[in-house]
Image: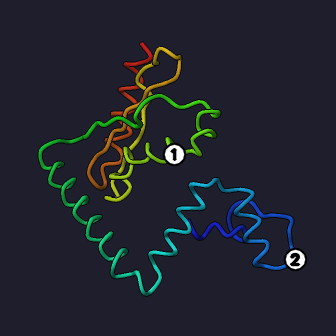
Amino acid sequence: MARYDSVAYGHRSSSDSSTYEMYASSRSEALNTIVRRRIFAGNYFLMKQYRQKYFERALKVRRIIHDELRQAFREVDLIVTPTASGTAPKYSELRDTLFSKEDNDDYFTQAANLAGIPSISVPVGVAEDGLPIGVQLMADKLQDRAVCDVAHILDGLIRK
């Protein structure tokens, strides 16, 4: 995420008094609190004095998640999980909680990201409040086509 410096990628602020000011203004204008916090945390954990304590341990946890999912895919072709803890919140709810619900719902999709496996979220229904409910389909590495095929079939069944 740190590469979104507003020079090569993303929104670029009109503030141009210095390069530092342009970076800071661009990130403040374009990125919400959660994204800025993640960039800050990523930089913090990569600092030399914290690298072994946090980053290298995180890599070990990532490897465990990867290995556990690879083991699961010896038994099944796909894993189906919720995409989020519920329906999409209203913007006013997110604003009032400083987007913490959005942050917590990331947990449902992190395993696929950490393991580097294909996944897709598919709407499978509508809740009482009229908002969509989704599931996430995950497959083993290099099974992107299978994920897309099943998502397409599932979407067709849901739309009937």
Instruction: Establish if 129 lies above or below 69.
Output: above
- The residue that appears at 33% across and 39% down in the rendered structure is 137
Q: In 3D space, how far apart are the residues under numbered discs 2 and 1 (Cα atoms)?
A: 34 Å
The residue that appears at 45% across and 78% down in the rendered structure is 46
Give coordinates of residue 54: x percent, y percent: 36, 74
Left or right of 50 in this view: 89:
right
Q: Nearer the viewer, mark 2 or mark 1?
A: 1
> Callout 2 environment at 10 Å: few (<14), some (14 to 19), or many (20+)?
few
Q: Which residue is mark 2?
A: 17
Specify few, some or many for label 1: CA neighbours under 10 Å numbering under 14, 14-19, or 20 or more: some
Q: Which quadrant of the rendered structure holds the C terminus? A: top left
Q: Residue at x 87, y 77 (%)?
A: 17
- Outermost residue on the bottom side: it is 48
Disc number placed over residue 100 in the picture, else none: 1
Q: Is residue 128 above or below residue 143?
A: above
Secondary structure, mark 2, is: loop
